[in-house]
Amino acid sequence: MAMIDHPTQLERTLLESIPLARAMGLSVLDYDGNRLALTAPLAANVNDKGCAFGGSMVSLMTLAAWGLINLKLGEAGLDADVYVADSAISYLEPVWEALIAEACAEPGQDWAVFVHDFNQHGKARITIAVEINSVQGAGVACKMFARFVAKRGEF
Amino acid sequence: MAMIDHPTQLERTLLESIPLARAMGLSVLDYDGNRLALTAPLAANVNDKGCAFGGSMVSLMTLAAWGLINLKLGEAGLDADVYVADSAISYLEPVWEALIAEACAEPGQDWAVFVHDFNQHGKARITIAVEINSVQGAGVACKMFARFVAKRGEF
């Protein structure tokens, strides 16, 4: 896969290569260099109760984390295959509006160490924290911690 | 929501009420009274690497667990709102073929106790184990443990 070094390119890559991202109507909302926010409308991601489907929330959160790691690698001039290894999700409140998933490195994780490890060994691990907030509710509606592995791509 | 007491009705309910289930091409593969298997073709659920997208795997696993609980409640003549509370997922191997997610109660969990609790309190909890197996690989490709809550529906 080509290096992803800009949010616009990330959005294009996600929509072109992942049919479910298209079905969800995913787009990049914001990126400040450390935090990536992806969004998706409620209508395409609704469940039988009329609120957001859990699978849509996990998909959006997983892609936010995956996208953040690819952006940080791209900024360092690196191209990698990025895989999710495991994740833990807490569903705290229903979401009745458009989904916004915000991903950042878990506290204590260091992007410089991650990039150094990748350069040194062709492989590095990092844990990402992702939240979906509820505008109507009181704060965090869904949170995920996910561990990812980046491996040097095969050329 | 109407009571779900048959796999055919479960499939119809999922496809009618959850747009992402339609986008995934989900269908019920098998149900033996204790184990529910849902399937989805690879093409609609692929990622940038050409194997199954993690979000699709979690969505299918979550719906398999949700569907199993609704079927067990429906068989007991009960109608409930079923919510996922939290889940933990391990991604062990890539999947390069159609997805099949098989859900059953976690060992030690008892459907009779679950139904009894629900009848007694209008609320009950159960933990479901779900696996996606890899035909090409060596056994389990992805596994999830998820805790669910069933609440008496509001009429």
Image: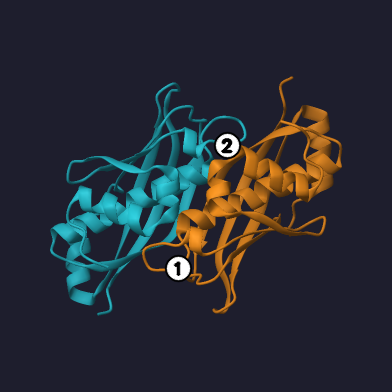
Chain colours: A orange, B cyan
Residue B82 sits in which quadrant?
bottom left
A153 w.r.t. A114: above or below = above
On the image, the x and y values in percent for residue B4 come to 21, 59
Name the residue that disc number 1 marks.
Answer: A51
Residue A19 percent coordinates (x, y):
55, 42
| Label at residue B40 | none
Please tell me whether residue B44 is drawn above or below residue A53 in the rendered image: above
Question: Residue shown at 53%/49% (left/top)?
Answer: A23
Q: Secondary structure at mark 2?
A: loop
Q: Around disc 1, counting alpha carbons within 10 Å, would you say few (fewer than 14), some (14 to 19), or many (20 or more)?
A: some
Name the quarter where the N terminus of chain B is drawn: bottom left
Task: Work out whether residue A145 or residue B154 is closer to the camera in this orientation and state it.
Answer: B154
Judging by the rendered image, the residue that carries numbered circle 2 is: B47
Residue at mark 1 to residue at mark 2: CA–CA distance: 26 Å
**Nearest the eye: B86 or B132:** B132
Residue depicted at 48% across the width and 33% down the height: B43
* Mark 1–mark 2 CB contact (< 8 Å): no
State whether residue A31 is above or below residue B55. below
Q: Quadrant of residue B122?
A: bottom left
Residue at 45% over, 68% down: A51
